[in-house]
Image (spheres, rainbow, N blue to C red):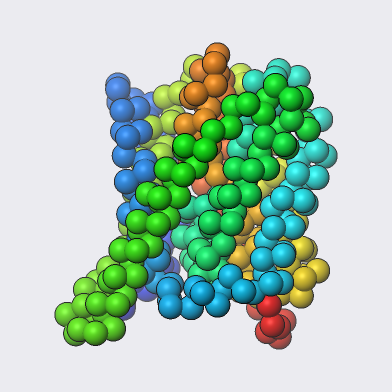
């Protein structure tokens, strides 16, 4: 088999690969003692996945991407105006327990800056635009989360947000993989051996994503049992969000008259949350364990299953419409 045929086979069978990985990870997380220690592997696995994804995106065009005014306007409107309004409408579904509400708001108010790039790429969205927007998304959520939490829960909730985890995530999950991918692309453009290496590395996105699913789920499943009632109580909100958020993103994209791939990028962004970056904040909140981490990782599990559907369904949005400037 050629490299291209192997890559096509992986992409065709990716749904089965991911679902099988999720099932296997849940079984391991429930049955293997001490397996939560693999939590230390989450960030390296994410960095590896993003490196593999960045290799598939022409990085030379990123300077132009940030000047796409309508795309950026749609992305920021969807994530920082429309999504908070949606959450305000869903808040009545949550129990009154403050820690539960804090966890849900903390995770759903923060747009993803890492594996959304991978899933949007697999879902035929314009992943390089999302990649270019990650610094803006990270900065704005860092600035706005305290204000949103104060608005929803009162001033006392805003003090938990610290810059450290966000900066750490940006450096190791975005900047370092991005630079390495750029170096490989530059090598591939100048040397035949570099081009060959780049082609082989092109096989990695699906296996790397499966690795992330395995590490994340194995590490978080043991925590769910300690706060099962809290975790179960937020599932209806997460399911409702998973259904409504991509539709909201797509409608915002239509309002700004974006083309299909660009609109799909906005839909992926509004649907995908920053749970893996938010989780360290949860562990730092006094009295948060086990409820707050359980509430957040429950969203991760719901979202990962939802992403399997998004990469099929969102990929079909806008295919019949003529391309429009964005």
Which of the 4 quarters of the picture holds residue 317?
bottom right
Which of the 4 quarters of the picture holds residue 192?
bottom left
Vertical position of residue 308 compared to residue 222: above or below: below
Vertical position of residue 123 compared to residue 134: above or below: below
Evaluate whether residue 70 shows in this view: yes
Vertical position of residue 255 compared to residue 236: above or below: below
Q: Which residue is painted at 55% across and 14% down in the image?
A: 287
Q: Which residue is painted at 17% across and 80% down in the image?
A: 193
Q: Position of residue 88 (x, y in %)?
A: 80, 38
- Residue 169 is left or right of residue 156, and the answer is left
Q: Which residue is painted at 52% across and 52% down in the image?
A: 113
Which of the 4 quarters of the picture holds residue 216?
top left
Q: Position of residue 71 (x, y in %)?
A: 67, 69
As rendered, which of 216 and 289 lies closer to the eye? 289
Q: Which residue is painted at 52% across and 47% down in the image?
A: 304
Q: Count the marks.
A: 0
């Amino acid at each position: 088999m050629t490299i291209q045929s192997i890559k096509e086979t992986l992409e065709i069978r990716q749904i089965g690969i991911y679902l099988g990985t999720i099932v296997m990870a849940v079984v391991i997380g429930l049955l293997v003692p001490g397996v939560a220690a693999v939590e230390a592997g989450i960030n390296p696995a994410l960095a590896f996945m993003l490196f593999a994804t960045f290799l598939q995106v022409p990085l030379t065009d990123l300077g132009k991407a940030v000047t796409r005014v309508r795309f950026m306007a749609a992305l920021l409107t969807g994530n920082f105006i429309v999504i908070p309004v949606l959450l305000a409408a869903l808040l009545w579904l949550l129990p009154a327990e403050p820690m539960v509400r804090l966890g849900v708001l903390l995770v759903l108010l923060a747009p993803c800056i890492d594996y959304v790039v991978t899933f949007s790429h697999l879902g035929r969205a314009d992943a390089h635009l999302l990649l270019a927007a990650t610094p803006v998304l990270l900065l704005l959520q860092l600035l706005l989360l305290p204000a949103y939490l104060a608005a929803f829960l009162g001033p006392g909730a805003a003090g938990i947000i610290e810059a450290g985890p966000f900066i750490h995530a940006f450096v190791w999950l975005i900047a370092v993989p991005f630079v390495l991918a750029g170096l490989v692309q530059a090598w591939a453009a100048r040397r035949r051996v570099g081009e060959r290496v780049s082609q082989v590395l092109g096989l990695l996105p699906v296996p790397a994503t499966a690795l992330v699913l395995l590490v994340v789920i194995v590490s978080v499943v043991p925590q769910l049992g300690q706060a099962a009632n809290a975790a179960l109580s937020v599932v209806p909100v997460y399911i409702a969000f998973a259904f409504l958020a991509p539709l909201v993103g797509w409608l915002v994209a239509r309002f700004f008259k974006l083309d299909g791939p660009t609109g799909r990028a906005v839909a992926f962004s509004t649907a995908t949350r920053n749970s893996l970056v938010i989780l360290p904040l949860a562990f730092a909140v006094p009295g948060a364990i086990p409820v707050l981490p359980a509430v957040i990782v429950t969203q991760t599990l719901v979202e990962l299953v939802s992403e399997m559907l998004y990469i099929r369904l969102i990929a079909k949005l806008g295919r019949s419409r003529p391309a429009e400037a964005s």
